[in-house]
Amino acid sequence: MSEGQNHSLTSIVSYPERGVGGNNKYRGNCSRELIKDLIKHFKIPHISDYMCGSGTIKDAADSLGVSSSVYDLHSGFDLMKHDVPDRPGFIFRHPPYHNIITYSDSMYSAADVQSRYGYDPRKSDLSRIPDWDGFVKAMNYCVMKQFCALEKGGRMAVLVGDIKKRGKLYSMIFELAKPGTLENVIIKAQHN
């Protein structure tokens, strides 16, 4: 996809060429182009992400001259335990896909986080929750916590997809808490 193209965000979007930004070796990483299109579509002056993973949000925002606030377990912020530190106008949310990809001690060292920030990230890592119901409860706790932190009139974009595992469907789309008013649903399929 060329730098100047913009997708319509009124339907399912596809980014055959993911573009640069973030770390595409960081499994579960979405295309920076999606974030750029969201920023342009909603004319976002500032974007927040409380599970930023490899930093795609910051890379996309920086490329457009937009400010960002990004946090993650690997960098000292535990959404399950810490208060949301700001009053965001726009949040991008891309939760892990249950236990398909384990992040702590796979994508980053839990021991390094514990040494640097004083907590074991494995205890709050949603990707380590073994049972589906426990994962859904934690995922929705995080969604509601962020939604409640939004400034009045703020928006939250959520990127999730359903999971098919050993012939069984686990619907993150169905199970995800949907507070506020739905403006658009962008679906990304995830199969395993």
Image (spheres, rainbow, N blue to C red):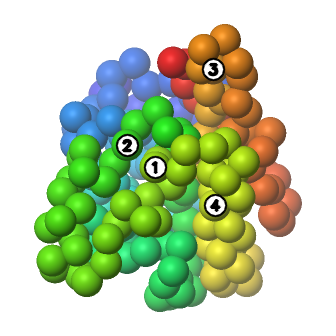
Q: CA distance from mark 3 to mark 1?
A: 18 Å
- Mark 2 lies on a secondary structure that is loop
Amino acid bearing label 3: Lys
Q: Quadrant of residue 154?
A: bottom right
Callout 1–callout 2 Cβ contact below 8 Å:
yes
Above or below: residue 104 compared with residue 19: below
The nearer-to-camera label among 3 and 1 is 1
SS for dot 3? strand
Q: Amino acid at mark 4?
A: Ala
**Residue 3 rendering spot, x and y as whole percentages:** 30, 35
Question: Callout 4: helix, strand or loop?
Answer: helix
Q: Residues within 10 Å of mark 4 (few under 14, many from 20)?
A: some
Reading the image, the residue beneath label 4 is: 138
The disc, 4 or 2, on the residue closer to the chain's N-terminal end is 2
Check the image and report above or below for 85 versus 140: below
- Packing grade of label 1 (10 A; few <14, some 14-19, many >=20) is some
What x and y, as percent, mark residue 98? 55, 41
- Whichever of callouts 1 and 2 sits on the residue coming sooner in the sequence is 2
Instruction: Locate the N terminus by quadrant.
Output: top left
Amino acid tagged 2: Thr
How far apart marks 1 and 4 lie (CA) works out to 11 Å
Residue that numbered label 1 is attached to: 128
Q: Which residue is mark 2?
A: 102
How many angstroms separate mark 1 from mark 2 (CA)? Answer: 6 Å
Give whichever of 187, 33 is nearer the camera.
187
x%, y% of residue 180? 83, 65
Separation of marks 2 and 3 at Cα, in angstroms:
17 Å
